[in-house]
Image (cartoon, rainbow, N blue to C red):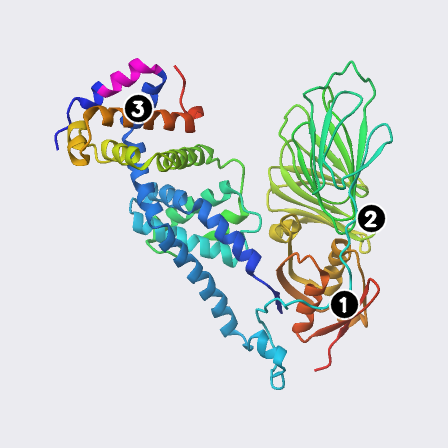
């Protein structure tokens, strides 16, 4: 194949018409690697469907193998029809979501509230708001639970005091807030966050929280970020981590995903974390220590609207469900509370789905009165 | 005892696959230099990630670290049984594959820009750029005038520039 002078001529023509385009041409034409990689990419894109099919087939195969390895169970439709008589105990099964259980506990929709430095309260209800704090910081809120701080109109001459805002996330809701320095904080149900409206001119960035939050701190080597909760304090330069410190629970902790984190306990103990490690505390036993191999997926699943309990007791699972669905859970006996489950599901909009799934394991049953759910052991 | 519905988990896994598979294969290919092998390695990797539920909170940088480890492991053992454990426990910010990921982004943008061109324009560009044919040849093959070819190339380059202008240093 003869490579004529055409491309060079054409390139010069193109360059004459518009010099900026010449650089594009040069980059594309001169980089052999780029050309080769683009060709490969084209080939791969052509095989996209085949590869996707292969992956999905394998996914399903794996699930199948797991099921076959343990005692297997007939599909849920059979259960519904009542051919339940001879099922021996189902060690492991993949259950399908029940279709339309009766509504026993209505969904709630409490409002997330934001309190400004003036004391004014705003509910993130049905409209978006664009507010300004006394120092010019702009706050934009959306009803779905997103808040963003922007300092484009900030002026430190407007206010000398440190202005604080308070965000309250009720049971059944979650919220995502971006602070004025770019730090993103995701708050789980029943959590609070108190924070300065602006960090300009500060030596540290300090916020206070109660409950559970996942923080993606904007790096700033000259200004450490400190998050304080009732029993913990975590100091970081720029990193992602999950803090869980609900005042009404005796266990609490911090899981580090990326970066480096220093965690202090109210007693004065200090622990330095590396990624994948966690700090774990228990008021009852007085424990406070570091653990490797933290269950990152388990700790951050809430942020992705998933229910993921990796062999946790019903007692633990119940605490999470209580906050996220605004219910109260009781057990018929302490033994029931100690059953452990591996749960992998999406966060259903209605709690009934979760309860039905639990019932399908034939290990537990439940009854409802008002917003109180009582879970009991099932007799075989 | 397992309770639940894997669908949302599966959805996330598939989403992640669709977004990153080709790029990871290209990345692995730079180590093993065989597309078929690279595909197998990345398929195997995604399966292992699925088994360990790593798609729940999955960062691209982590995927690239795993892919690199899988590739190196393959080269060492010539087996597909890769090594996921090291990658998971040592996800350390120090191992930076930002440059590789940016490069993949660039490739993807070029690909999308080319795909967004009008059909004839796209065909001309592919023939000139990938098949390295001369203008005269392309003109003959496609029964178009030389001028039309040149116009198509001009339009293509302009579109490409619009689509990833940040990549080039503007002179």
Q: In the depicted view, which residue is nearer to us: B25 or A324?
A: A324
Mark 3, secondary structure of its residue: helix
Q: Are marks 3 and 1 in contact (CB under 8 Å)?
A: no
Residue B20 drawn at (x, y percent): 44, 45
**In the image, which residues are magenta?**
A10-19
User: Label 1 marks which chain's residue?
Assistant: A
For residue A85, above or below residue A51: below
Task: Characterize the local packing of mark 2: few (<14), some (14-19) or many (20 or more) Cα atoms within 10 angstroms.
Answer: few
Q: In the depicted view, which residue is nearer to us: A273 or A360?
A: A360
User: Label 2 marks which chain's residue?
Assistant: A
The residue pinned by badge 3 equals B154
**Quadrant location of the N terminus of chain B in the rendered image:** bottom right
Using the rendered image, report if marks 2 and 1 lie on a common chain: yes
Residue at the farthest left position: A2
User: Label 3 marks which chain's residue?
Assistant: B
- Rounded to the nearest whole Å, what is the CA distance between mark 2 and mark 3? 65 Å
Verify whether residue B168 appears in magenta: no
Q: In the depicted view, which residue is nearer to us: A276 or B121?
A: B121
Mark in front: 2 vs 3? 3
Quick one: label 2 or label 1, which is nearer the N terminus? 2
Mark in front: 3 vs 1? 3
Quarter of the view holding residue A233: top right
Q: Which mark is residue A337?
A: 1
- Rounded to the nearest whole Å, what is the CA distance between mark 2 and mark 1? 21 Å
Task: Characterize the local packing of mark 1: few (<14), some (14-19) or many (20 or more) Cα atoms within 10 angstroms.
Answer: some
Quarter of the view holding residue A238: top right
**Quadrant location of the C terminus of chain B in the rendered image:** top left
């Amino acid at each position: 194949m003869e490579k004529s002078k055409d491309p060079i001529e054409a390139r010069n023509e193109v360059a004459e018409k518009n010099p900026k385009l010449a650089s594009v041409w040069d980059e594309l034409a001169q980089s052999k690697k780029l050309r080769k990689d683009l060709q490969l990419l084209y080939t791969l894109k052509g095989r996209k469907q085949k590869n996707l099919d292969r992956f999905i087939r394998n996914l399903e195969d794996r699930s199948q193998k797991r099921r076959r390895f343990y005692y297997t169970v007939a599909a849920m439709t059979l259960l519904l029809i009542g051919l339940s008589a001879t099922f021996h105990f189902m060690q492991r099964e993949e259950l399908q979501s029940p279709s339309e259980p009766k509504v026993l506990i209505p969904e709630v929709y409490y409002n997330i509230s934001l309190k400004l430095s003036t004391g004014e309260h705003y509910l993130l209800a049905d409209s978006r708001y664009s507010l300004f704090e006394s120092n010019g910081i702009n706050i934009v809120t959306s009803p779905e639970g997103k808040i963003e701080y922007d300092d484009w109109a900030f002026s430190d001459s407007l206010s000398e005091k440190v202005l604080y805002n308070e965000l309250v996330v009720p049971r059944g809701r979650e919220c995502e807030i971006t602070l004025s320095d770019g730090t993103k904080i995701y708050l789980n149900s029943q959590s609070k966050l108190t924070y300065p409206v602006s960090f300009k001119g500060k030596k540290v960035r300090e916020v206070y929280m109660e409950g559970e939050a996942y923080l993606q701190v904007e790096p700033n080597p000259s200004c450490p970020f400190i998050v304080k909760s009732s029993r913990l304090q975590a100091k970081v330069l720029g990193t992602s981590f999950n803090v869980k410190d609900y005042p009404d629970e005796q266990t609490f902790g911090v899981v580090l995903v990326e970066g480096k984190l220093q965690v202090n306990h109210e007693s004065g103990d200090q622990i330095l974390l590396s990624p994948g490690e966690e700090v774990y505390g228990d008021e009852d036993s007085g424990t406070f220590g570091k653990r490797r191999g933290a269950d990152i997926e388990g700790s951050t699943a809430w942020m992705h609207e998933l229910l993921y309990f990796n062999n946790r007791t019903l007692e633990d699972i119940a605490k999470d469900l209580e906050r996220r669905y605004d219910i109260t859970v009781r057990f018929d006996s302490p033994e029931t509370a100690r059953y452990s489950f591996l749960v992998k599901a999406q966060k259903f909009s209605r709690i009934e789905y979760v309860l039905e799934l639990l019932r399908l394991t034939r290990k537990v049953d439940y009854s409802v009165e008002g917003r109180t759910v009582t879970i009991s052991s099932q007799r075989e | 005892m397992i309770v639940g519905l894997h669908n949302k988990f599966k959805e996330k896994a598939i989403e992640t696959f669709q977004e990153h598979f080709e790029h990871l294969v290209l990345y692995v290919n730079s180590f093993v230099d065989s597309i078929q092998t690279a595909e197998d390695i990345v398929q195997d990797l995604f399966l292992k990630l699925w088994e360990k539920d790593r798609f729940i909170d999955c960062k691209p940088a982590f995927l690239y670290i795993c892919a690199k480890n899988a590739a190196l492991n393959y080269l060492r053992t010539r087996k597909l049984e890769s090594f996921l454990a090291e990658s998971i426990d040592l996800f350390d910010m120090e191992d930076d594959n930002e440059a590789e990921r940016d490069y993949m982004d660039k490739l993807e943008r070029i690909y999308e820009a080319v795909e967004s061109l009008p059909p004839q324009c796209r065909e001309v560009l592919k023939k000139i750029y990938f098949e390295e044919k001369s203008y005269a040849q392309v003109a003959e093959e496609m029964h178009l005038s030389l001028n039309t070819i040149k116009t198509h190339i001009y339009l293509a380059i302009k579109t490409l520039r619009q689509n990833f202008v940040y990549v080039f240093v503007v002179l």
